[in-house]
Image: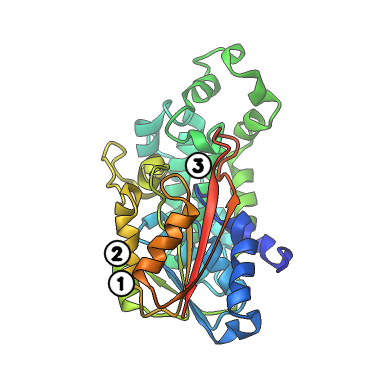
Amino acid sequence: MSRSPLTPYFRALPPYLGGKQKLVPWIFNRLSQVIPQGQWTQLRFLDAFVGGGSISMAAKVLGFQSVHSNDWSARSQLVIKGLLANQFQVLTTPDQLKLVNTQSQQASPGWIEGQFCPAVFSKRHARALDRYLSNAGQLQCPTKRALALLVAWRLITDFVCMPTSIGTSNRPYAETLDALRDWQTLNPKRFVDGSMSRLLKPSWSSIERHMQVTNQGVFSGTPVIGYHQDAFQFVQVQSGDVLYLDPPYPATSNYETANRTLDAVLFNSDPAQQPSVSPFSKGTPALEALLDLAQQSTCWVLSYGNRVVTLDELTTLVKRVAPHRTVYSEARKYTHMAHVSKNTQNQELLVIAYQ
């Protein structure tokens, strides 16, 4: 399967911890060995954990009969509403003018400036986000509001030195931009890898660039129906020809904790509130229970990590839950954040179980 048809659509998706964009060709290639691609137009595709949206986006591009995309998190709902289920609505030039409108600038510090400056953002960036999100809230169309928040998601990653530093280690850079720290105290690498130059770009140009990229992900094709359900409820209520499962992996980064600051900024929530931990992050029992509830779907495609289980152990688990299914399994070396992780033993596990 060629990667080229997916490239512009993947560019529209927000940066996402644990995203599957690089693994999509491998996953769908292995699926085609079980179900020929010529039959996909007749199949109902279910995605129980949308996350950053790459699997559902690929299913939409590749022409399944219908795609049913589910996720419990509010951030993934932006992906579902703004891009996956959206067939035609884009952000226009008048929308851009509304989003960059400076008349909404508040005399007193806005909520983001008050909560996250300078721990996360410089004053300039915090004020830009306060203004932008206030303007985005004035858009009348729910789909356009979702698109605008996807642009905000990208802005947030632009306004920190490194995308992985949201809410963790951006303070030195924010303080430097606010003239509270000497430039010479910063890591010299940040001046040659493009990180600092990105922080110095005007916010209006970033908004324009991100709008254009986000709009590229809007196209008319396979109908996508979005759901906002617990995964256990979703697999019980929905049945499909192909059910893709990519639950949180045990002993890896907890999505809600890792995205707490991002969620707080996007949805004006309490940044101090301790997020709940997914049962899937606590071990394999939740996965086994989920599979047991998903028996009505014909073909399971399961992505998993190897921090807790080996490929043989995961295959055994699947066979125990569904002894009547034919099971194919494979592993490949893969690190989701190679620039952060020093673990060279990371693998992505893929199990396909069909009947």
Give amino acid for label 3. Answer: Ile
| Residue mark closest to the camera, 1 vs 3 | 1
Q: Are marks 2 and 1 in contact (CB under 8 Å)?
A: yes
Query: Judging from the image, what secondary structure is the residue with disc 1 in?
Result: helix
Label 2, residues with CA under 10 Å away: few <14, some 14-19, many ≥20: few
Structural crowding at the residue carrying mark 1, measured as other residues with C-alpha within 10 Å and reported as few (<14), some (14–19) or many (≥20): some
Q: Residue at x 46, y 65 (%)?
A: 80
Q: Position of residue 145 (x, y in %)?
A: 45, 60
* 182 left or right of 255 in image: right
| Residue that badge 1 annotates | 293
The residue wearing badge 3 is 156
Sequence-earlier tag: 1 or 3? 3
Could you say where residue 262 lies in the image, as x and y percent from the top left? 42, 43
- Tell me: residue 105, above or below residue 74: above
Residue denoted by label 2: 289
Tell me the CA gap for discs 3 and 2: 36 Å
Amino acid identity at mark 1? Leu
Image depth: mark 3 or mark 2 in front: 2
Residue 13 seen in render: yes
Kind of residue at disc 2: Ala
